[in-house]
Image: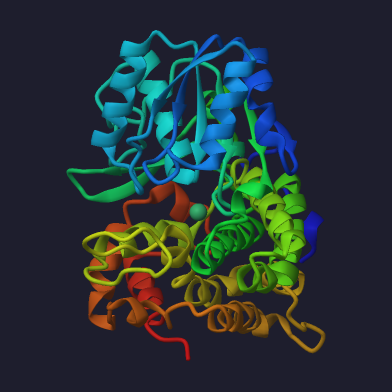
Amino acid sequence: MGCCQYFEPSVGGADSFTVEMPRITFGRGTLAEAGERARGLGMRRAALFTDPFLAGSAHVAKVIESLKSAGIDAAVFSEVLIEPGDEAVTQATKFLNEGNFDGVVSVGGGSVMDTAKAALVYHRYPASFTAYFAPPIGEGQPIPGPVLPHLACPTTSGTGSETTGLSVIRIEALNVKYVFGSRYMLPDEAVVDPACTDTLPPMVIASTGFDLMSHAIECYTARAYTCWAKMNKPNARPMIQGANPWSDLHAREALRIVGEYLERGVSDAKDTEARDKLMWGATLAGMAFGNCGTHLPHAFSYAVTNLVKSWRAKDYPKGEGPFIPHGVAVILNSPSVFRFTAQAAPERHLEAADCLGADIRDAAPDDAGEVVAGRIIELMKNLGLPNGLGGVGLSAEDAGALAETASAQRRALGNAPRDVNKNDIAGIFSKAVSYW
Ligand SMILES: [Fe+2]
């Protein structure tokens, strides 16, 4: 099954797809352009969103300086939390409501950009917090229209959030993360400066690199857009619309970048070629999943984050309690997931493995799951990742609870190439406990 056959028309299925994109500026030193870019978006008084760890950084200082030079008055909101929840977004919304701003500049990783996107929505269209989340969590209301301009400046090479209209927020009452999205949440513009990653420690580059890798494999192996139902209203087409030629293009290149540069970028902070490439790979993978959607590894990661009780990743800011970085939570499931999904789209799994640098010359379609899982596991081992869910303190006995939580992520589950039920999910989790 090649690319064209993968998008074979199906009865009642979609026959078109939509690409949503911000303007992107990429390159070392481009953070200094933030002021002119923001001014071009009509900003004169901007809210600068960042997190407490970045607030005093050279990156934020550079953006503030640039905004000032462009005649933009900026007020900093640095209370963004890692893994933001609805309470944190409510605080950010309050900041926007009280500041008389005409735009937002976000400087940080996925948590910062996702908080900015969500706060922009609740600032302009106040509603109960779950109004815009899909059922069964929320009421599934569409976001009514445009929000204030948003210039996004990512500082890590993983999230790709600068190119998507998606935001991942934890609903505190349920203590689980959910995705909501809209074309109106897409940043208007992104300034992607890979110099921001120069000072990131190895485990941060590894974790974010695995995040970008999984974005790309999930997009490449997602259910074809032609298998989703045709939309009668064009604006009702969700961003999680399935694999399509646009997402393929970016996913393949992102995987080639990971295969060639991830180990180099992690092992040597001075390898700017590798770090630049990884930043570009993250942006590409964002372009893919922002117009395709991820599937099982991401849907499952939220359950893992929720259940880890004591493990704390090294190289991240010190703190109390458990902390599993998003990319780690995702990749611990991925090999087991792809062993399961390969059966439904073996050629796509093999092509993804090939892009990642696996030798697929003698591989038959039945080997696809093992080949792609093997390459991921090889990278996990080489980069010091935990050995499956057991490495972060979970066991096969947790599989039922994990499956229960993961089952609520309906759209993402539906984006997998193979149908899954709760038993399948528990089985995938139990086979993700240990890989070597
Ligand atoms: Fe992700």
Residue 354 visible in the snapshot: yes
Question: Residue 432: percent from the left, percent from the top?
Answer: 41, 79
User: Outermost residue, left direction?
Assistant: 173
Tell me how many marks there are: 0
Colouring scheme, one of rainbow, by chain, secondary structure, one colour: rainbow
In this view, 73 is above or below 302: above
The residue shown at (26%, 65%) is 322
In this view, 195 is above or below 214: above
Residue nearer the viewer, 375 or 193: 193
The N terminus lies in quadrant = bottom right
Question: Residue 164: percent from the left, percent from the top?
Answer: 57, 38
Q: Is residue 148 left or right of residue 355?
A: left
Question: Residue 350: percent from the left, percent from the top?
Answer: 71, 74
Q: Is residue 148 left or right of residue 371?
A: left
In this view, 106 is above or below 99: below
Residue 20 visible in the snapshot: no
Question: Residue 275: percent from the left, percent from the top?
Answer: 69, 59
Residue nearer the viewer, 113 or 336: 113
The residue shown at (33%, 48%) is 177
Q: Is residue 230 left or right of residue 6?
A: left
In this view, 359 is above or below 209: below
